Image (cartoon, rainbow, N blue to C red):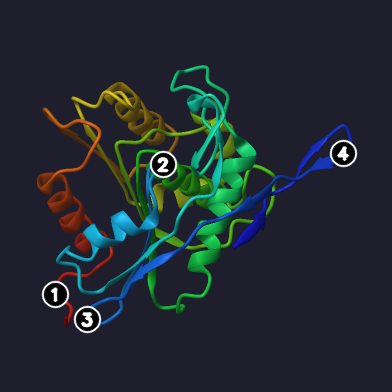
Amino acid sequence: MSFAGPSLASGGKTVRRAIEFGRTYVVKPKGKHLATVVWLHGLGDNGSSWSQLLETLPLPNIKWICPTAPTQPVTIFGGFPSTAWFDVGDLSEDAPDDIEGLDAAAAHVANLLSTEPFDIRLGIGGFSMGAATAMYSATCFAAGKYSDGSAYPANLSAIVGLSGWLPCSKTLSKKIGGDEAARRAASLPMLLCHGKGDDVVPYKFGEKSSRVLVSTGFQDATFKAYNGLGHYTSPEEMNEVCAWLTSKLGLGGRSP
């Protein structure tokens, strides 16, 4: 699927980056369909690997949508092409954010959710760069718009971020301005998990992302730390995710 990234105006000139998304994998619910969660993989991965893991989880009422990111040059790889939701140079406090890529990825996810039935609860989750995209989508939901000003259409009920970081953290307080944005931010449950042994996305980035979100008004954000966990997931972490989604999406006690 092609997607022309949201336009960025510079000196009256509009620039668009053509973005080609990869294959999307869908895991159908084994029971009654009550919620749909788009799950986003990490840098260099694809939707297939996560769909196979998610299919094994004891969450029969969730439909999982696992898209594959575009293959594009990635600065942190010296410009070598890789599947990536957006471009990233390095993980540091002052690294520039690829706003155009983030907006395009968030819009692709919202589009995947746009055809779900009106009574189905919607969520976004992800790992590493996918978690960063999920968190960015949460800020767009709260603000009611993407960074380019276009309206954000999806009504989100849950965000899960594993081993990730919050893009555009320095400008978040400006983005979540106004009573309506503050209300949406406060109402959105978020679960952020990070391993203390992560040598790819340092633990401090996950912890700081959580602090920034809470201080900006995301009052229902929960941060979970895991001793000894590196840049991968674990059964303990996934059990936490299952219990949290069951609670926040109202899946407990429903008929399978």
Q: Are marks 3 and 1 in contact (CB under 8 Å)?
A: no
x then y, percent, for residue 55: 23, 66
**Which quarter of the figure is the N terminus placed in?**
bottom right
Displayed quadrant of residue 157 = bottom left
Foreground residue among 216 and 165: 165
Circle 1 residue:
253
From the image, state whether disc 3 or disc 1 is nearer to you.
3
Residue name at image x 25 percent, y 82 percent: 32
Helix, strand or loop for disc 1? loop
- Residue designated by label 4: 13
**Position of 124 relative to 87 (above/below):** below
Say which quadrant the C terminus sits in. bottom left
Decide which of tag 3 and tag 1 comes sooner along the chain.
3
Q: Which residue is mark 2?
A: 44
- Residue at the image position 31 percent from the left and 75 percent from the top: 28
Label 1 vs label 2, nearer the camera: 2
- Residues at marks 3 and 1, CA–CA distance in whole angstroms: 13 Å
Mark toward the start of the polypeptide (4 vs 3): 4
Q: Earlier in the sequence, mark 4 or mark 1?
A: 4
Q: Position of residue 142 (x, y in %)?
A: 51, 49
Q: Report how far apart the C-alphas of labels 4 and 1 lie in the structure.
A: 54 Å
Crowding near the residue tagged with mark 4, few <14, some 14–19, many ≥20 C-alpha atoms within 10 Å: few
Residue type (three-letter) at the residue carrying disc 3: Gly
Where disc 2 sits, the SS reads loop
Q: Earlier in the sequence, mark 2 or mark 3?
A: 3
186 displayed left or right of 100: left
Q: Nearer the viewer, mark 2 or mark 3?
A: 2
Identify the residue under disc 3. 31
Secondary element at image label 4: strand
Residue 35 in sight: yes
- The reply, left or right, for residue 125 in relation to residue 13 is left
Q: How far from the left and from the top, in percent, is residue 102? A: 56, 42
